[in-house]
């Protein structure tokens, strides 16, 4: 694949590099903010599942005026430093990470918690949706410890079969819950974002990190009556915004020639690092299947 082939296919990928964002996801948060004014009055925020850090970039630039806000970013993976962003490397589903995050907000709660967490997708939809729901609920659990009353929570959600249960659980804690799909999120993806405003836990609710929120005794398909919540679905991003499912020509509107932009911040220790090093040395094993060789005896040969 050529250096510019992804630039050709994905306009938001290209724009992210040109505008200095570490990932195209930056546009999702920006378009969500355009629609819901997420950053209004926000000075303290938590970015869960933050690597490589484009949401943290947006947060640190947009909140508190001139970057004086306080952002805590958390991810399993190491992330290159960002000015004004405190980083924690850890698993948000683990008690120890949750405690570390909460520690930073004791006595001074956060106005906004965002989570763009995604598990490594397996392709088995039920498993992927379940893992995604667990991440969201881990994020919600952390939010219940750090959010101030009236605070806002935004989290990636997979609009799968059991999404109603998640909406119902979110509605227990927030006065308004809706599902939003920014223009920069591909239509072909089941991803959307739960936008929850007005943190207002039930009276007597005591946040408890040891209590998992996903209750396995629920029969997910039997939610009805007051437990069946249908939330509004909102698309966001101006209609003139680029459509993430289309390809756009590389030539610029002013007629000037397109120039390749390298990524703003390449991953610092990606899982494929070793393979890239081997490829540079021409030592990467290559899968070959000779014409009359049965698939079961596929060989691995050096390139
Ligand atoms: N919002 C980020 C940005 O704008 O740069 C992109 C986030 S990326 C789509 C999803 C991230 O979720 C990955 O970096 C992954 O490491 C992180 N993640 C997945 N499971 C996690 C977990 N249990 N704890 C912490 N991070 C997790």
Image: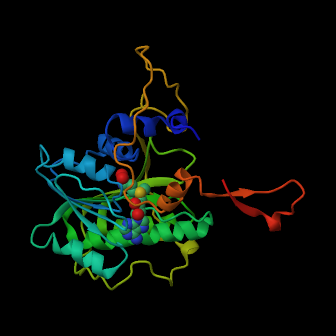
**Where is 202 relative to 264, above or below?**
below
Q: Is residue 136 in view?
A: no
Q: Is residue 239 in view?
A: yes
Q: Residue at x 40, y 34 (%)?
A: 261
**Residue nearer the viewer, 131 or 294:** 294
Name the spot of residue 204 as percent of width and height, x first.
22, 81
| Residue at the outermost right position | 292
**Where is 142 relative to 62, above or below?**
below
Q: Quadrant of ligand 1?
A: bottom left
Q: Residue at x 70, y 59 (%)?
A: 301
Name the spot of residue 224 as percent of width and height, x first.
52, 70
- Position of the N terminus, as image quadrant, is top right
Name the spot of residue 80 as percent of width and height, x first.
29, 56
**Residue nearer the viewer, 101 or 41:** 101
Direction from residue 30 to residue 292 in the image, left or right: right
Name the spot of residue 186 as percent of width and height, x first.
52, 44
Q: Quadrant of residue 13?
A: top left
Q: Quadrant of residue 143?
A: bottom left
Direction from residue 19 to residue 71 in the image, left or right: left
Direction from residue 241 to residue 272 in the image, left or right: right
């Amino acid at each position: 694949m050529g250096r510019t082939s992804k630039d050709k296919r994905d306009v938001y990928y290209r724009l992210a590099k040109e505008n200095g964002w570490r990932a195209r996801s930056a546009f999702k948060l920006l378009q969500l903010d355009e629609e819901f004014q997420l950053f209004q009055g926000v000075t303290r925020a938590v970015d869960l599942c933050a690597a490589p850090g484009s949401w943290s970039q947006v947060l640190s630039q947009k909140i508190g005026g001139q970057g004086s806000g306080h952002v805590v970013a958390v991810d399993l993976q190491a992330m290159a430093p960002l000015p004004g962003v405190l980083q924690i490397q850890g698993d948000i589903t683990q008690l120890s990470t949750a405690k570390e995050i909460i520690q930073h907000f004791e006595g001074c709660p956060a106005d906004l918690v965002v989570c763009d967490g995604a598990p490594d997708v397996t392709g088995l939809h039920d498993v992927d949706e379940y893992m995604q729901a667990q991440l969201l609920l881990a994020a919600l659990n952390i939010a219940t410890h750090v959010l101030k009353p009236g605070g806002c929570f935004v989290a990636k959600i997979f609009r799968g079969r059991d999404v109603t249960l998640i909406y119902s659980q979110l509605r227990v804690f927030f006065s308004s819950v809706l599902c939003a799909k920014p223009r920069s999120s591909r239509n072909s993806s089941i991803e959307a974002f739960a936008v929850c405003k007005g943190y207002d836990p039930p009276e007597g609710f005591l946040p408890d990190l040891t209590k998992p929120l996903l209750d396995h005794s629920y029969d997910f398909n039997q939610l009805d009556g007051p437990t069946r919540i249908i939330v509004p679905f909102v698309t966001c991003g101006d209609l003139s915004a680029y459509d993430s499912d289309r390809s756009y020509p590389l030539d610029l509107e002013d007629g000037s020639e397109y120039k390749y932009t390298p990524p703003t911040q390449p991953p610092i220790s990606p899982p494929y690092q070793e393979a890239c090093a081997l490829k540079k040395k021409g030592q990467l094993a290559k899968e070959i299947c000779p014409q009359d060789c049965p698939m079961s005896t596929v060989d691995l040969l050096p390139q």
